[in-house]
Image: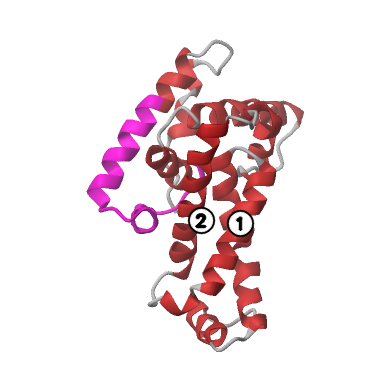
């Protein structure tokens, strides 16, 4: 089943084929986990959000009307992440320092050496802290476009906004994140700050 297209697997899943749905899970679980990890800043939370995303997707598979299945999944993950963040702000029980390092595990790397690993870990901590100073919508825009490298069109679809609205939010988010990275004591130097906010859209 690994070679079947998404829509074929979706159609089989609608008929109750668990193997078909599990193939979709295997195909997209890393993408969902990576986004939810960067949104939540906590590995355990991201694992729960990823599991809940696929449970919700299976229960609502009949509502998928075709098109980009990954975007549909990530929209479910977005809603789950937003619900968690609203609850998190009320409870304030998760320390960003506990799992910020896990953030670096899903950042792209090309066999870094010891120095690069240190930089990646430190950058991950700073990005995790900086992202949590942004609103949910601004954070998701930066996570998807600048960190995960998704295209503007797919990101706009996930966020349920127009391209113009996405670009506006992204510009504001980049500015705020850049200000955080360059003004917070102990963060990277100003000339390096653009690395984290430079678009890598696929």
Crowd tier of the residue under label 1, counting other residues whose Cα lies within 10 Å: few below 14, some 14–19, many 20 or above: many
Residue range highlighted in magenta: 147-176
Residue 3 in the image: above or below residue 77: below
In this rendered view, identify the residue nearer to me: 33 or 49: 49
Residue 121 in the image: above or below residue 140: above
Residue 83 in sight here:
yes
* Residue drawn at point x = 59 percent, y = 59 percent: 52
Q: Position of residue 160 (x, y in %)?
A: 32, 56
Residue 191 in sight here:
no
Q: Position of residue 117 (x, y in %)?
A: 71, 31
Q: Position of residue 133 (x, y in %)?
A: 46, 27
- The answer to which quarter of the image holds residue 153 is bottom left
* Residue drawn at point x = 48 percent, y = 21 percent: 181
Left or right position of 154 against 85: left
Left or right position of 134 against 125: left
The answer for how far apart the CA atoms under marks 1 and 2 are is 7 Å
Q: Which residue is mark 1?
A: 50
Q: Position of residue 25 (x, y in %)?
A: 62, 69
Mark 1 or 2 closer to N-term? 1
For residue 77, which numbered disc appears in the image? Answer: 2
* Residue drawn at point x = 51 percent, y = 80 percent: 10
């Amino acid at each position: 089943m690994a070679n079947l297209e998404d829509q074929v697997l979706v159609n089989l899943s609608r008929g109750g084929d668990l193997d078909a749905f599990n193939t979709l899970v295997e195909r997209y679980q890393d993408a969902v986990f990576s986004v939810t990890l960067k949104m939540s800043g906590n590995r355990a939370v991201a694992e729960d959000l990823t599991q809940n995303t696929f449970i919700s997707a299976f229960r609502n598979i009949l509502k998928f009307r075709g098109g980009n299945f990954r975007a549909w999944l990530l929209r479910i993950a977005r809603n789950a992440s937003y619900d968690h963040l609203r609850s998190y702000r009320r409870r304030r029980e998760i320390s960003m320092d506990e799992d910020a390092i896990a953030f670096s595990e899903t950042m792209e790397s090309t066999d870094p050496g010891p120095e690069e690993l240190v930089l990646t870990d430190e950058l991950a901590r700073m990005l995790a802290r900086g992202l949590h100073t942004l609103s949910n919508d601004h954070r998701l825009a930066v996570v998807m476009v600048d960190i995960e490298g998704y295209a503007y069109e797919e990101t706009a679809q996930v966020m349920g906004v127009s391209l113009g609205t996405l670009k506006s939010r992204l510009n504001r988010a980049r500015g705020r994140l850049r200000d955080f990275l360059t003004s917070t004591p102990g963060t990277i130097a100003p000339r390096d700050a653009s690395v984290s906010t430079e678009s890598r859209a696929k």
